[in-house]
Amino acid sequence: PHKDQPERTLNRQPQPKTDANTRETLDMETGSAPQIVDTLIHARWIIPVVPYKSVLNHCSVAVHQGQILAILPTEEAKRRFSSSDTHELNDHVVIPGLINAHNHTAMTLLRGYADDTPLKTWLEEHIWPAEGQWVDAEFVTDGTRLAAAEMIRSGTTTFSDMYFFPEETAKVALDAGLRCQLAFPVLDFPTVWGQGPDDYIHKGLALHDDYRSHPSINVVFGPHAPYTVSD
């Protein structure tokens, strides 16, 4: 859910205690019924981005239609909202999703390959030959699925990626429910994904058009490095 959407109730003041009978009487008098939402999370602690250095105790998050509808004390949340997808996290901290700002997600399948070598040696004598032999659309799909599982498990909900076959990375991100920025690679020489700069840019712009204005996927230029892209 987007953290910067609709109402956010950040009320940390002690709430008056009411028993179940009192609440039922109040509901009958007002004629109100709990609002149905997609997801309701009751947590021991919530640590939001704002207010800064704020820790909310015994509060809840109401999520509806992909947006955070409210953050409010749990007792109030249980009166105001109802959901078939309710989570009781009595020993947990709920925080905003983490952001991984530098990824080559499919390279999870090359993890540990030719470690502890200088960058130039690592690239030219190990990684680039291995990529030329093994990397294709299926490789990227499988490697990105593994990376997505690891990110979700660690609390990462958004990542920025630059690797070959970004169209496959986009599909996996959508399936996993992750947000991503895809920087399509641009290099001076042929690779498994293209023949040169013009080809990379052509494919990248087509991918950009496929996801234009998409709520969770953003496609941008990704010049690889000063030593692989000429002036």
Image (tube, rainbow, N blue to C red):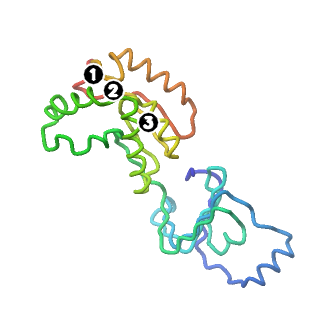
Give me the residue at 55% from left, 53% from top: 3
- Quarter of the figure with the C terminus: top left
Q: Which residue is mark 2?
A: 223
Considering only vertical position in the picture, is 109 above or below 34?
Answer: above
- The residue lying at 20 percent from left, 41 percent from top is 113
The amino acid beneath tag 2 is: Pro
Q: Is residue 45 left or right of residue 115?
A: right
What kind of residue is marked 1? Val
Depth order, front residue of 95/137: 137
Q: Which residue is mark 1?
A: 229
Vertical side of 142 occupied by 157: above or below: below
Disc 1 is placed on an element classified as loop
In which quarter of the view is residue 134 placed? top left
- Tell me the kind of residue under disc 3: Thr
The residue carrying pointer 1 sits among few (fewer than 14), some (14 to 19) or many (20 or more) residues within 10 Å by Cα, namely few
Image location (x, y in percent) of residue 72: 62, 67
Q: Is residue 180 left or right of residue 41?
A: left
Q: Nearer the viewer, residue 188 or 83?
A: 83
> Which disc is residue 169 wearing?
3
First-in-chain label (2 vs 1): 2
Res 202 → quadrant: top left
CB contact under 8 Å: marks 2 and 1: yes
Residue appearing at x 42%, y 43% in the figure: 145
